[in-house]
Image (cartoon, helix red, strand yellow):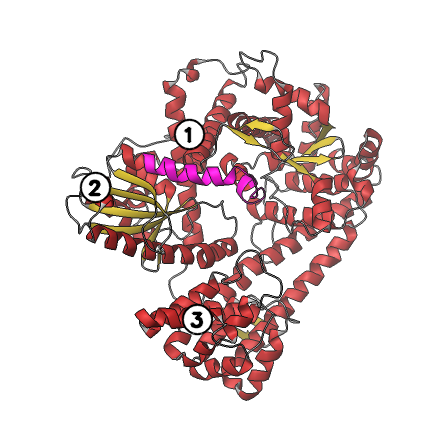
Amino acid sequence: MLDNESNYFDRLYARVRTDNSVENAFLSAIEAYLEGKPNKGKKKPNQISNHVQFWKAEFLKLANDKVFESEAFILALAIYFKQTTTSNIAFIERVLIESPASVRKAIRRSEIVLIPNHIKWDEINLLSQSYSAELSELINICQAFQNSHVQRIELLNSYLSIFKDLSLFEFFAYSAVYSFKFLPAKAISFDGDEISIDSQLKAMTKLTQWKLENGKESDFTLNENKILQSLKKHHSPLVFPSNEDSSLPDFMLHQFECLVQAQVELDEFLSRSVHPFCFKDSVKYEVKGTRLESVNSDCATDDTWERNGLRNKQLQGYWFNRAMNHFVESGIAAQQMGTAENHEANQIAYVKALASFLELKDVYGLEDTLECDSGLYVDLFQALLSQELMSAFYIKEYIEAFYIEYAEVNDWQHAIGLAAIKGMAKGDNRMPITWSKWKAKVNNIVGWTVNAEFPKGNVRAVKAILDFWTLDLKSLSNKLKSKTIHRIPEMTERPVIKIGDYAVQLPWVMASQIGSVSAINNLRRFANQRPSLKSETTRIENRLGDEFTKRGFTVVKNHTPNTVAGEIDLICSIDNVVIVIEVKSTYYRTTPGEALYHRNQTLRKAGKQVHRKVEAIKNELANGGSLLQELKLKSDSPQVIGWIADTSIEYDHDYFAGYLKISIEELLVALNDEAYLLKDLDAEMQSMQRGGEISFSEEPFTLYEKGFSGQNFVNVIEQSKVWHQSTAKNFKETEAFS
């Protein structure tokens, strides 16, 4: 047993207990464990792990059921069941006796449900022998999850085996035909639901990763002969049907449809069943016969993910409207963009790129140029514009061309062939998959970089742009096999596929782009070790502070009080209201599971940080001193508020340790009083495509009917008026958003 004098957590408990309550002492020790202390960072040789220290600590013997039922302890207990370093089954037994619900919640949150060989199941099963009533039902449910998971994995593997010997190019060729086949009417999942484009993209990313993990060296070399042979055998019979035998490609296309169904089935099993089981206590499950059924004890449906999706669409409209205003005011709108035929599409592409550019600068702290993987520097706006122009090109020349032919013949296969033949007649490749030598790809888009300095375009700039958007399959395959990475970017985040010396593109992927999402996830999820990341984070804080200053706030940046609270990102004061802001910068979450992890890790910790910092500021102001003068306060007892300001929208208007979490974008909208610019951009674009009337923004209205003041601003944020008013005006929806 560890000497309690040498145990970090025992020492921490004793130190805090001297000046605080027992409850605070327990909470401090538990929170330290959740933050990875004392071994956070680089471990020393022979250092005892924090898991061993915590679960062998003497202070735990003093814990009672109130401690066991706390959220912090349940999260700590979840880590216990997840880690394999140490064991303290006697203590776990005591927790089980005094608070069985806490143990059950912790087992669920540990995410070992789909790991039947995890060593902690031995402990759980052993405890179940003496405490069957407390654990047997949970064990049965977990075993049912494991059986369901195995069934789905086996089904997926049965289809994957069919495609094991196909080259990467051939695999993508089948995905291309599949995507066009199901443009007119969506593919159907095993459950009978439509497979959305989003689900299809996620499935294709997973399947591509499988191919890369199992790829052969020959997969990463392409030449014209290989391409022609692959097309002749696998692609052309589907695009140009004839009397010749097409049984092989017909069979393979059907198997590809089943493969996507199997991958979607697995993905949705994880997102709709497993993740809720792990993280949503209100969702209950029962085993009925051989079936696993969910029983939601909370009658109110949790629509947080869907609500955030709608809000993200409105924010896309907000940035589009800001960009449109800049586009018009700058005079660029009056200029001809490209040919007369492409002028309107080019204008929309330009505004969409500008919208992403403004968002990435104002919210994410990016600069005008960025360093790519290769070391080349890319102009951010040019990179975004090139992506939007590529997307516009593929929508018009492939997707819309297909729909034109489909409207005439009402047959997907015939329509693909007609679109391809008409393209050939003009010397263009309009097949469902496109390819070109890398050098030719550069030459094809060099015109997009023409400016006064480079009247013939800038080849180096094009190479940097392509590098920014490229999915280099050989490089990713090597990293996956060496375990350097564990996942690849989403297909939309890097839509230019590099196989050997060739650029391969899938029109359906190119047509599904959201520029800002793709760019920020490129940079913050898959390039999160960049040297510039720290400076970007600093710029996020500074630019947000500048927005408060423009609104009349007095702002102090990076203040460090004389306590252990740590540096405070922003302190903003006006009208005797002081707002302490902790800024968090991350990326766009693409699954509910990612959002839940963000909540349990980053946001929980941020709430504790804000609590410490608010208390430190209250004490500092009460004692007088320079901060009082810096904030231009007339009273030493102002209203002090703490907020978590996050680049992501997940869990907005939730409270962590009693402090509000809010998105930076909502703060910007409220500070600039621009809620009228929020609009569902997708809906308006669809209306425009149908020839209907469009209205990208509403007539201006104000969030501050009684004038702007510190308290009115706080009310707008805390009462969610940005969303309430914009929703009422733009969507005619109700209080569900407030």
Please, what is the dominant secondary structure of the magenta stretch?
Answer: helix
The spot of residue 103 in percent (x, y) is 48, 76
Please give the name of the residue rendered at 61% of the width and 70% of the height, measured from the top-left corner: 84
Q: Which of marks 3 and 1 is nearer the N terminus?
A: 3
Q: Distance between the residues labelled 3 and 1?
A: 69 Å
Q: Which of marks 2 and 1 is nearer the N terminus?
A: 2
Is residue 107 in sight in this rendering?
A: no
Mark 3 or 1, closer to the camera: 3
Q: Is mark 2 on a helix, strand or loop?
A: helix
Instruction: Give above or below for 441 relative to 159.
Output: above
Look at mark 2 in the image and give the residue it sits on. 629
Is residue 448 in sight in this rendering?
A: yes
Q: How far apart are marks 3 and 2 (CA)?
A: 39 Å
Residue range in magenta is 522-546
Please give the name of the residue rendered at 70% of the width and 28% of the height, measured from the top-left corner: 420
Look at mark 3 in the image and give the residue it sits on. 11
**Magenta stretch: includes residue 690:** no
Judge by depth and name the residue closer to the eye, 263 or 214. Answer: 214
Image quadrant in which the N terminus is located: bottom right
Q: Which residue lies furthest to the front in this view?
A: 5
**Badges 3 and 2: C-beta atoms under 8 Å apart?**
no
Left or right of residue 670: residue 504: right
The spot of residue 616 in percent (x, y) is 29, 54
Q: What element carries label 1?
A: loop
Type of amino acid under label 3: Arg
Q: Earlier in the sequence, mark 3 or mark 2?
A: 3
Look at mark 1 in the image and give the residue it sits on. 692
Instruction: Categorize mark 3 by other alpha carbons within 10 Å: few (<14), some (14-19), many (20+).
Output: some
Please give the name of the residue rendered at 45% of the width and 26% of the height, measured from the top-left corner: 351
Type of amino acid under label 2: Gln
